[in-house]
Amino acid sequence: MLRYIIMRIIYMIPTLFGISIIAFVIIQLPPGDYVTSLIASMSDSGQAFDPTEIARLREIYGFDDPIYVQYYKWISGILLHGDFGQSFEWKRPVSELIWERMGATLAVSVASLLFVWAVSLPIGIYSAVKRHSLGDHVFTFFGFLGLAIPNFILALTLMYFSYKVMGQSVGGLFSPEYAHAEWSWGKFTDLLAHLWIPVVVIGTAGTASLIRILRANLTDELNKPYYITARAKGLHPTKALLKYPVRIALNPFVSAIGWVLPNLISGVTITAIVLNLPTAGPLLLRALISQDMYLAGSFILLMGVLTLIGMLVSDILLAMLDPRIRFDQ
């Protein structure tokens, strides 16, 4: 097992290096840079700009350097000093901006992931065992409904419900009186009172997808000879179901970790904007629009790292869960 993990980590190193290059190239693809975006913004607002000041900014930020020089400065700062660079727009270190958003981002992401698993697992098993029953049709209907409704519409609906029926403040993760207060039991309960809306909105689509995947996989396993033989020999139905078919059908749940982690952080940007959540998505969108390359590049690199970590966790769990996978591979 240890050798299996070490080999997977070794494979991650060149992949991570390639991700860093691709991330830096991607943020350089749009024409212009932060200074040209700044000039365009000043022109739209009717402000005059000094060409001398513009030239000074380009020299300070190194925009006139070749792209490989800019990449070397960025990646060497990260590897040697843990310095992700300076945000041009915010005039602050990129690391500070990222870590300020990561707490709320991870709270929403982990809660959404637990919601997805807690809901989709029992419903998926039930739908597979009770195929074409009334309950299966009801869950299928709501599953397709969850896939069809855009997240931002569901977010607006739940915000209205929360405000009108429950009397809660809408938007954000805290009420105004707790937004800047020190952590206490009251602030924690206020967080839970606001957290359910983004969790339900973000988890709805993922829940519907995993229910359909688990239902299809488990249905296929229930028709295989090993399960039929186990039932014929008198093994208790629940034990036969949970010990063999469910264990194999859980593979999609485990393998989904690789893409769920980065998707939960960056893939719900519109929902985060609608709900006014202090997460990473809106900050990444703003960095891409303003061409704040160090901030945008660091976010893209972080998502790549999360993807690799998720894939590593998936590989380890799959190796433990699925007896067909050998550790010496």
Image (tube, rainbow, N blue to C red):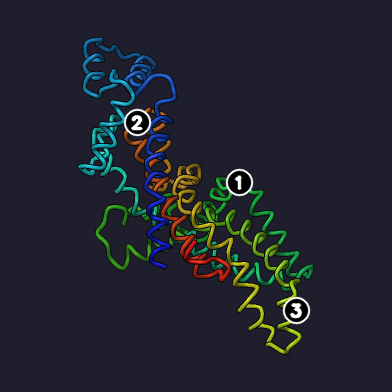
Q: CA distance from mark 1 to mark 2?
A: 30 Å
Q: State the residue in front, 9 or 227.
A: 9
Which mark is first along the chain, 2 or 3?
3
Element under disc 3: helix
- Which residue in the protein does label 2 denote? 293
Relative image position of residue 162 (x, y in whole percent)? 51, 57
Element under disc 1: loop
Relative image position of residue 97 (x, y in whole percent)? 29, 42
Residue that extends furthest to the right in the rendered view of this protein: 132
Q: Is the residue 146 above or below the residue 288 in the image?
A: below
- Which residue in the protein does label 1 denote? 150
- Which residue in the protein does label 3 denote? 228
The quarter of the image holding the N terminus is: bottom left
User: Identity of the amino acid at label 2?
Assistant: Met
Q: CA distance from mark 1 to mark 3?
A: 41 Å
Q: CA distance from mark 3 to mark 2?
A: 58 Å
